[in-house]
Image: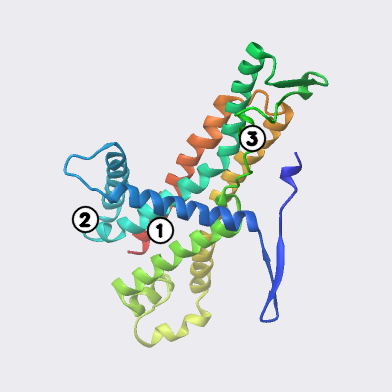
């Protein structure tokens, strides 16, 4: 249960400014990036006309994101955004999934250890202190002991800093694309509203236009909602997993709960975040 309150922080100074860094989230973020880079190289290293299993999986995933993006933004604009949207989706998905690895390894280790102990009696020992405080401690000399000692992985998307950075990337892409496609003046007029004139010299009156400030607040709030939605769902799933796992001492991790909050919810949240990014781009396109 102490995982809910313990946050490792490293503080240092850069040019007179105090900086706080979560080293676990930092390392997990670059671990996800490294895994994705290695995976991309493995998938694209030997492309074949008749794809193998790995290439086929990559193509199916990419074509799915391409169909969704093109179907929302249109053929012309959608094609140019597919690489970015696919990168966002696959990063968020991997970042959501990486945190369930310790739970999976401990669950597998528990199954192997209990079976081994039942047949040999040397797998470890049962420590019983009431129904809710019963756990199996494996023998350190067993081949599966490392499954219990698997290092703690944290989802990078469990940190609001990661989610906010992703939201800001989408925000920057949306508005840079809007300026590039519509021109700065037409883009700027979009903040004026339809009631007060915004053509010619009337546009210079934007400081006294209340709709200008309301629209600016609306755009900023979209970044906050985009980021906090992902953060809230991932952090909430993590809390449920930790609480339930702590109550049963990892002896009986509910497989359905792990599958839902770890695998299924990770896919859903990655898809929702990606769809919102596509929608924001389409609204300003």
> Tag 1, which secondary structure?
helix
Q: Is residue 41 above or below residue 188?
A: above
Please state the horizontal and vertical placement of residue 138, each as a whole percent of the image.
69, 26
Does residue 52 sit above or below 144 in this rendering? below
Q: Is residue 225 visible?
A: no
Q: Describe the element under mark 3 as helix, strand or loop.
A: helix
Q: In the image, residue 91 lies at what x, y percent? A: 45, 51
Element on which disc 2 rests: helix
Is disc 3 surrounded by few (<14), some (14 to 19) or many (20+) residues within 10 Å? many
Location of residue 190 in the rendering, given as x and y in whole percent from the top left corner: 39, 71
The quadrant of the image that shows the C terminus is: bottom left
Nearer-N-terminus badge (2/3) = 2
Name the residue that disc number 2 marks. 75
Q: Mark on residue 280?
A: 1
As measured in the structure, the alpha-carbon distance from the residue carrying label 2 to the one carrying label 3 is: 42 Å
Circles 2 and 1: CB atoms closer than 8 Å:
no
Q: Identify the image quadrant of residue 74.
A: bottom left
Classify 10 Å Cα crowding around label 1: few (below 14), some (14-19), many (20 and above).
many
Q: Is residue 104 visible?
A: yes
Q: Which mark is residue 241?
A: 3
1 up-or-down from 20: above or below: above
């Amino acid at each position: 249960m102490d995982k809910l309150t313990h946050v490792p922080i490293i503080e240092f100074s850069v040019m007179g400014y105090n900086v706080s860094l979560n080293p676990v989230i930092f390392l997990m973020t670059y671990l996800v990036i490294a895994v994705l880079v290695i995976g991309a190289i493995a998938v694209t290293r030997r492309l074949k006309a008749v794809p193998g299993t790995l290439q086929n999986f990559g193509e199916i995933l990419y074509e799915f994101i391409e169909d969704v993006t093109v179907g929302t933004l249109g053929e012309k604009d959608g094609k140019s955004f597919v690489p970015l949207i696919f990168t966002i989706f696959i990063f968020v998905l991997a970042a959501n999934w990486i945190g369930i690895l310790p739970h999976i390894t401990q669950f597998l280790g528990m199954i192997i250890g209990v079976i081994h102990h039942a047949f040999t009696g040397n797998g470890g020992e049962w420590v019983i202190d009431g129904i809710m405080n019963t756990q199996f401690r494996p023998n350190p000399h067993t081949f599966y002991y490392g499954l219990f000692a698997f290092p703690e992985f944290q989802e990078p998307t469990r940190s609001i800093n990661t989610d906010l950075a992703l939201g800001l990337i989408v925000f920057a892409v949306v508005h840079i694309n809007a300026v590039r496609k519509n021109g700065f003046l037409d883009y700027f007029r979009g903040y004026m509203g339809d009631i007060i004139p915004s053509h010619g010299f009337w546009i210079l009156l934007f400081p006294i236009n209340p709709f200008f400030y309301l629209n600016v607040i609306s755009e900023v709030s979209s970044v906050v909602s985009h980021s906090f939605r992902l953060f809230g769902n991932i952090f909430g799933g993590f809390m449920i997993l930790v609480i339930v796992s702590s109550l049963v001492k990892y002896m009986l991790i509910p497989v359905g709960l792990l599958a839902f909050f770890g695998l299924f919810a990770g896919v859903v949240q990655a898809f929702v975040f990606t769809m919102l990014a596509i929608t924001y781009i389409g609204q300003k396109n």
